[in-house]
Amino acid sequence: MNHEHMGGEDTLALIRSMEGFRAEDYQDATGRSIGYGHFIDPVKEKELLTKTITKDEAEAMLKKDVASHQEGIRKWLKKDLNNQQIAALTSLAYNTGAKSGA
């Protein structure tokens, strides 16, 4: 199975559309987030709690976060899926906080 790009732009577009962009931190269900729903680690990323970010910075965070979630998906994915299915699985992992150990 070839899942190298794991949904590519479809995945990013889905998450962007569902999360929306916020330049400053905000409260969500599990803590503080910024950008396109990037969870702020209060220990490792406390500077983000007082920072205003650009869309380019948010995009970089989104791509890094998506790659982390897709690493976990790759571990258990046994069948070929289309880009929309991969995007949906990634969005689920992104929103539930599932990481590479999923």
Image (spheres, helix red, strand yellow):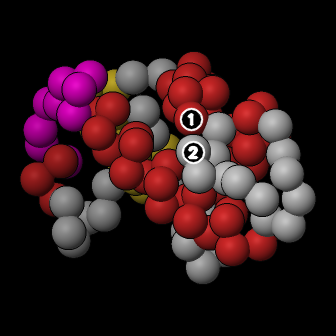
Q: Residue at x 19, y 48 (%)?
A: 49
Q: Is residue 82 above or below residue 100?
A: above
Going 48% across and 61% down the picture, which residue do you hit? Answer: 68
Query: Picture coordinates of residue 101 (x, y %)?
Result: 60, 79
Q: Going by the picture, which residue comes out furthest to the right?
A: 79
**Up-down relation of residue 31 to residue 43 (above or below):** above
Q: Is residue 20 left or right of residue 90?
A: left
Question: Where residue 94 is drawn, which disc sits there?
Answer: none
Task: State the CA–CA distance, disc 1 to disc 2.
Answer: 5 Å
The answer to whether the residues at label 1 and label 2 have Cβ atoms under 8 Å apart is: yes
- Horizontally, residue 22 falls left or right of residue 82, namely left
Q: Residues within 10 Å of mark 2 (few under 14, many from 20)?
A: few
Q: Which mark is residue 5?
A: 2
Please indicate whether residue 11 sits to the left or right of residue 31 in the image. Answer: right
Give amino acid for label 1: Gly
Q: Is residue 29 above or below residue 102?
A: above
The amino acid beneath tag 2 is His
The residue drawn where x is 77% and y is 32% is: 84
- Numbered range of the magenta stretch: 49-57
* Residue that extends furthest to the front in the rendered view of this protein: 2
User: Closer to the camera, 98 or 24?
Assistant: 98
In the image, residue 91 above or below residue 100:
above
Residue at numbered disc 1 = 8
Residue 73 image offset from top left, x and y in percent: 68, 63
| Residue at 69 percent of width and 74 percent of height | 75
Q: Is residue 53 magenta?
A: yes
